[in-house]
Image: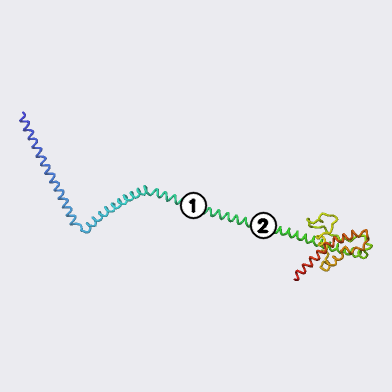
Amino acid sequence: MCAVQSATSNTTTGVLAARLTTNELDYWKLLRDILGGVGQAIAVVWQASRIGDFLLFILSIFLFIFKWYIIVVVIVISIRIIGRVGYWGLPQLWKIYRESRRRQFEEQWRNDEIKRRAARLAELRAKKVVDAATLEAAKLQQARREQDIKDKLQREEVIRQTKLKADYKRWEMECDIAFRDKASMTKFPFPPLPRCTDPNCSAFTKLPVPACQHNVKQFFKGSGVFSMEFLKLEKSRWHEDRFASCQEYLRPEFRSRANSLFIVLHPWYEELKEQQRSAVS
């Protein structure tokens, strides 16, 4: 039984090996037939086509491959550049952006400051113009007031001079009448002197107004006939010795009052005489 089974197995194995060998031979034969057909086809295509068209075909394939190669390389390089820019460039770009914004803000601030200064300067100029106009108006008003005061003083001076001239003429007539007969004179013709205007003078507060260097000079200067010759005559006329012929009980009073005029007129005359002498020399 074992021998039969062994023989049977050997027979089966041999048949299978023969079939495998036959199949392998058929496969290689088929492959040779395919390769032979491809070779014949290539030979036919090669013979049927021109060599230039074939080369153009090969070149187009090469260019197509090269184009896509370049595209891929550019994409890869771009990705790497973008990555590097993103890693290293974004902080720099942000810094540049912030610096640009800072400069813009500074420029805007400078422009605003220039505008504010220009507005302030225009305001100051306008204020100066207004102040100048106000000052000019105040000066004009002050000038008008001063002119009014001057006009008033001039009018008062004219009135005063007119009054002094009238008082002097009236007093001169009284003196002429009184001095015609001093022996019978009962009233001393004392000049109507104005009140002294110097507060430091002893005659400033006295009433009736006594003779002093201020009001005597003012009275005789306002006579309208004042001169050195006039002053010399007046000085001599009011010497106390000229009243020695008056009544005895009135003589001391008349001599005292005449002397109050003489002690002002005499130094005044000598002073003016010295001034004339100095001016001539």
Q: CA distance from mark 2 to mark 1?
A: 41 Å
Classed neighbour count for the residue bearing mark 2: other residues with Cα under 10 Å, few (<14), some (14–19), many (≥20): few
Foreground mark, 2 or 1, reads 2
Classed neighbour count for the residue bearing mark 1: other residues with Cα under 10 Å, few (<14), some (14–19), many (≥20): few
The residue closer to the viewer here, 147 or 66, is 147
Q: Which residue is mark 2?
A: 135
Q: Residue furthest bottom?
A: 281
The type of residue carrying mark 2 is Leu
Q: Say if mark 2 contacts mark 1, CB within 8 Å.
A: no
**Left/right of residue 134 with respect to residue 158 in the rendered view:** left
Colour setting: rainbow
Q: Which residue is mark 1?
A: 106
Percent position (x, y) of residue 161? 82, 62
Q: Residue furthest left?
A: 3
Percent position (x, y) of residue 128? 62, 56
The residue closer to the viewer here, 82 or 101, is 101
Q: How many marks?
A: 2
**Left/right of residue 136 with respect to residue 71 in the rendered view:** right
Mark 1 element type = helix
Q: Earlier in the sequence, mark 2 or mark 1?
A: 1
Residue at x 60%, y 55% (from the top left corner): 124
Q: Quadrant of residue 261?
A: bottom right
Percent position (x, y) of residue 26? 12, 44
Q: Please, is residue 94 above or below residue 239 in the view?
A: above
Percent position (x, y) of residue 154? 78, 61
Q: Please, is residue 12 above or below residue 163 in the view?
A: above
Quadrant in the picture for the C terminus: bottom right
Residue at x 82%, y 59% (from the top left corner): 212
